[in-house]
Amino acid sequence: QFLVGLAVWGLAGLVTDTRQAKRFFPLIGAGSVLGYVLGGLVTKPLASWIGSSNLLLVWIASLVVVVALGERLLAVADTGRGPRGRRSDERSVEQLTRGLRYVRSSALMRWMSLGSILFSLLFFSLYLPFSRAATARYPDPDELAGFFGVFFGVSTGVAFLLSLFVMNRLLARFGVPLVLLVLPILYVVAFGVLSVGSTFAILAVFRFAQVAWLSGGAISSWEAVINTVPSNRRDQTRAFLYGGPTQVGTVLAGVVALVGESLSDTMLSRIGLTCALLATATMIGVRRAYPREIVRALREGRPHVFDADPLGGERFGLQFSDRTAVTAAVEGLADPDPRVRRVSVHVLGDMDPDEVTEPLLTCLRDDDADVRATAIASLVRASGEASLPAILQISSDPDAVVRLAVVDAIGALGPDGGHSTITLERSLLDADPNVCARAAVLLVRAGGTESALATLAELTTHADDLVRSAAFHAMRDHGGPELFGIAEAGVSDPAPAVRAEAARALVAIDPMRAPAPLTVALADDHALVRDAVAEALGVVGIAAADPVVDSLTSPTRWEGAIAALQHVPIDGRQDDVRRFAAEMVAGAVDSHRLAMSIEGEHGDRSALLKDSLLWRSMRDANLALRAVAVLDGTRALSAAIENLSVADPAQRANAIEVIESVGERDLVKPLLAIWEGSAPPIEPQTLRERLASDPDDWIRSCVELLDAPRAVSEGGTMARTLTTLSPMERVLFLRKVALFAELPPHDLQPIAGIAEEHAFADGDAIAEQGESGDVMHIIVSGDVSVTAHDSSHGSDDARVVAVRSAGDVVGEMAVITNEPRIAGLVARGDVRVLSIARPQFESILRERPETALGVIRVLCQRLAEASPAASETGATGTTTTSA
């Protein structure tokens, strides 16, 4: 029976994922129970017909059919999944060992192992007294057989009905972990009653409930939990649970039965009650670990590598008075490898100043700039102000990293109003913006000078993004309240990286004044800035809770506010966050239903409207789930959200299971209609009215486009010039350009607005080889030849190496590399292009990082064309390069 159960549920686990297990395992359990019932009913007439000795042949024939069916199911399950990863030569002991290793690494499986022992013990603790009582009640063997036949026939029939009609609903309503609690609670009630008084009727009732629930519900729920184990470890884990802990529980039950001969029924019932309470506690552990195990399964398929500082920021555990350690570190200063010297210098900074100051001073003259800079930092830690005169002597070091270390040393020790202040004032003229910026903020903090404030203001408005970022970064470490206004202005800088640094500087300068401008910055278009603002508000803490939660009422701040709530405590505002989540859930479901009701009668225009609604639906669903994650306080939902968009259906199923199992279950449950397609469509007339009155301007524009005259063909080319096209018609064309494939539909409109149209006649040069590549082109209509001069053959004639057509991008390589064009572009027939200059293209990349994916895709295509196989084709004048 153990082997049959292992095979049945092993096969079931292979052909279902986590979500399907919840729905199909009860049906599988019902089929198993039905098989027992039918087997019991046909055994007697079958034995009378063919003889009991031939029943073994029926058993063998049945196994052959089952094996054939199992192979067929495995073949279907393996389609598209690749090899099963099973070793045919792996022995049973090895599988048990592998199962044990996985169980030891998983909190959920450890709880399941303990539960296997206790449930096996509890099963026989109730089974044995019932059997004894039934034998005493029916001493005649025929009467006893008749009773057992009726009893198990009815109980398995009830189990069948439970599996078929009840379990799916219970699991869908309460989830697997909660349903698992039913069995131990049943045992608690049973043994609690039996410890007070035991009769045959009471034993029969509880044994009936045990059989019915075990076969009809508990086993399928149990197997659904095991199905969370990754498929390549599932068989070994199941083999271990059934072949190890379950058998241990059976042995313990036998021991209890033997000992029970000398114990009263009441004492045995109390032992059973104790085990039942332990089993209940174990299932509570399973319930807590179940969502985490699913999250673990998700993360195992997406490993992350974290780089660490070799020094780790630690002190090496060395004692200040350790002479041997000091000697070893000092000897390391003479090592020829500068990395060894740098580590030695770092270690010396944490030792006794009397022992290490002199060796560190000698390192200020080291040949390696990093060693000199590290020596400055170590001297500050070890000797403090006593080392400042020696440090100031190298303030004019030729390497910027050393000059910066000198300024940082002054900041750590405090300007003395003498030589250190003079050094800072001289550093205001330093060529390196980091040195200049940090010196300026230190002078402002020390009392300020007009020149320092003017320098800092100049740096924060410098033409170079890196210089502005350096200035605001310096304010994070040294900025005083006088700089708050400058940092506040920086939150509106054109460059996202600068805005992010300014946001961090604001909270470093004055945390109490920072929430007001930072909550406004939550509406920033760039995720980099929103994340920086969110982290900064997290530094403010509880004082930022009210303005952040209030920002949930502003659609432009939704993304930023939700990001901030992951860092800001929301004590007292949970209801507001929950209300926002509920509104987002309703909006997501409604947008998805609208999208799925749209027919494709208008071709690409209908597709634009549908995709826009689907994007809005997923945005609202994402916001809702992130809000629930804030309320839940765990990272489980965050992992699930990341996996909702992956291609692997099993990963998506795991993600949806996490969503349904964690946190505000009733709140997010309506979202399942989005991923499981259960919402009914909307009538066409009602749909059109709903869309025409949609509060979103973009959606209404998409609706208006449905009835507008067609200016963009289904193939993607324009029927009229760009100047006569509406913004929405331009978007229709840009949607077919691979470069912008990853952008949401509405993000294409500003790109269409900055693109300029140019027309070329046959033979016109669109771009010359060797010229500065400051413009890229998207071909609207016609063909463009990519040409190159082959000087190696002594000819000035241009050779056609590729031909691009409508929807292709040309000239992008020169724009990306900022190098002269490696090929020319010539019109073949009448050609129209949309041109985007380098500054606008770089702005697109900064503001819409998703465009970088399109760039990578195009570059990969170019590389593929330049491969040896493609080059052969290129010799005929059809492929290989781009200008």
Image (tube, rainbow, N blue to C red):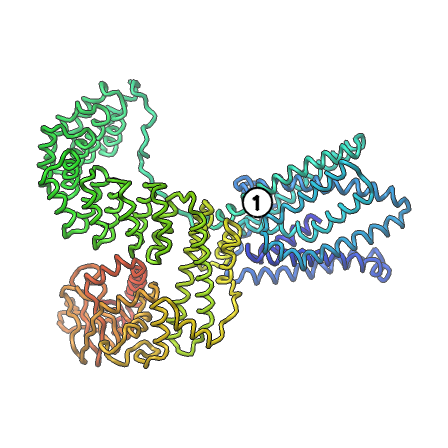
Percent across and percent down for residue 773 are 17, 64
- How many numbered callouts? 1
Residue 186 in percent (x, y) is at 69, 44
Q: Which image quadrant for residue 606?
A: bottom left
Place residue 446 in its image quadrant. Answer: top left
Report x, y in % for residue 144. 87, 48
Pointer 1 residue: 287
- In the image shown, does 132 or 335 lie closer to the viewer? 132
Q: Secondary structure at mark 1?
A: helix
Residue 680 drawn at (x, y percent) = 52, 69
Using residue 229 as the reference point, say whether residue 325 is left or right of it.
Answer: left
Q: Does 738 sit left or right of 675 as displayed?
A: left
Pick the front one: 52 or 89? 52
Please say whether residue 573 is visible from this viewpoint: yes
| Residue occupying image coordinates x 62% and y 51% | 221
Is residue 855 positioned above or below 659 on the image? below
Q: For the view shown, which residue lies furthest in the right direction?
A: 140
Asked if residue 864 can be seen in this view, the reply is no
Q: Which residue is rendered at x = 29% and y = 55% of the image? A: 524
Q: Is residue 323 above or below residue 48?
A: above
Q: Residue at x 19, y 75 (%)?
A: 758
The quadrant of the image that shows the C terminus is bottom left
- Quarter holding residue 570: top left
Label 1 crowding class (10 Å Cα cut-off): few <14, some 14-19, many 20+?
many
Q: Amino acid at mark 1?
A: Arg
**Left or right: 520 with respect to 121?**
left
User: Relative to residue 533, is residue 762 depicted above or below?
Assistant: below
